Image (tube, grey):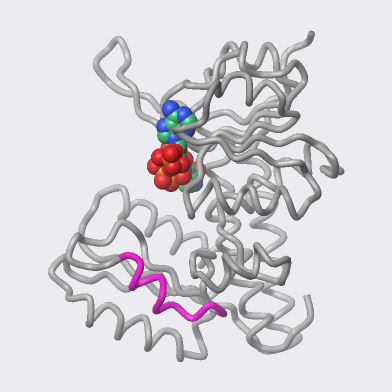
Amino acid sequence: MSEAAIIDGKAFAARLRQTIAAEVAALKAEHGLTPGLAVVLVGEDPASQVYVRSKGEQTLEAGMHSETHRLPAETSQAELLALVERLNSDPAVHGVLVQFPVPDHISQAAVVAAISPDKDVDGLTVANAGRLASGLPALTPCTPTGCMMLLRDQLGELSGKRAVVIGRSNLMGKPMAQLLLAADCTVTIAHSRTKDLPAVVREADIVVAAVGRAQMVKADWVKPGAVVIDVGINRIPKDDGKTRLVGDVAFDEVKEVASAITPVPGGVGPMTIACLLANTVLAAKRLNGIGE
Ligand code: NAP
């Protein structure tokens, strides 16, 4: 069997951002509408600071309105919820995103519940999760949405495929499974209590690994010709004492078996912010009664 195609998420995301920028320009010209994204960061977590900066930069590059609210770590939950309320009713803002994790004294669930479902561009509210599960128009979480785009690009029609999603988080595994189901795949959700995980994964035409365990999925877990989407981001030590990023899939061996595979980095990761921009444009159109 020939080696797998390497799915270039970085290039796909760059093309998607161009398409979004063109749509934003058209919305401005035809409707006087500038989609706007507000990102809220509480505290000084270094990884979150990098993500928030990238989100702001890419929002501006797409021609959209961007605002970043940086709050000190000691901000109370009530103060944070009051800001979210303000953003919910600000007509210049169509997407509201609170960067997680928030400090321990703030309830993540309370923050998610405070975000207007119409501006919930992370797709995390119960309303959007329920809409997705019920087959209604929803704002869907960015990373699974990006995985679906890569899969459709690779496979075209997904109907009837056997898909195994490893991981069942609200952010990743569950919405991924719902999106695959909505695309008429036959879906299995695996997790830490799944018995004989390798045998379950071997049934799949599509494998999505969203676990957070470095290089867990091995070549002999994968059906020859399967498409493998690796969501995991894990840091492992190198011989020189530095670290490198790897996914949840043992890339070097699995690429010998799969028909296509996403690398880490450069696969799923770049799709997340591009899909955040796409969700913000979608929210702006829906809030202004503009057809999709
Ligand atoms: P999470 O909330 O920690 O969920 C991990 C899931 O993996 C859980 O459902 C857990 O099962 C399951 N799991 C743990 N050990 C397992 C095992 N040995 N066998 C089978 N399943 C196992 O993580 P997450 O937020 O979904 O993220 C998953 C990974 O994706 C992380 O590496 C994260 O960094 C990455 N990620 C990347 C992006 C991106 O590229 N932009 C976005 C989101 C997440 P239980 O439910 O039974 O505990």
Q: Nearer the viewer, residue 185 or 282?
A: 185
Q: Position of residue 193 (x, y in %)?
A: 46, 32
- Given residues 28 and 101, the one toward you in this image is 101
Image location of residue 49, percent across then percent down: 30, 55
Within the image, what quadrant is residue 286 found in?
bottom right
Q: Furthest residue to the left? A: 74
Q: 116 above or below 196?
A: below
What residue is drawn where x is 53% and y is 55%?
Answer: 273
Which residue is depicted at the point 52% across and 25% down? 195
Left or right of 130, for residue 169: left
Q: Is residue 227 left or right of residue 214?
A: right
In this rendering, is residue 11 above or below 181?
Answer: above
Q: Position of residue 156 (x, y in %)?
A: 85, 42
Image check: 255 left or right of 161? left
The residue shown at (41%, 84%) is 87
Image quadrant occupied by the N terminus:
top right
The quarter of the picture showing ligand 1: top left
Q: Do we see residue 233 in this rendering?
A: no
In this view of the protein, can residue 95 be seen by the observer? yes
The residue lying at 30 percent from left, 10 percent from top is 239
Expressed as whole percent of the image width and height from the top left, the position of residue 123 reads 54, 65
Q: Is residue 236 above or below residue 29?
A: above
Q: Is residue 246 magenta?
A: no
> Of helix, strand and loop, which mostly describes the magenta segment?
helix
- Between 184 and 144, the residue placed more toward the observer is 184
- Up the image or down, 214 lies above or below 33; here it is above
Q: Which image quadrant for residue 201?
A: top right
Quarter of the figure that contains the C terminus: bottom right
Start-end of magenta stretch: 108-118
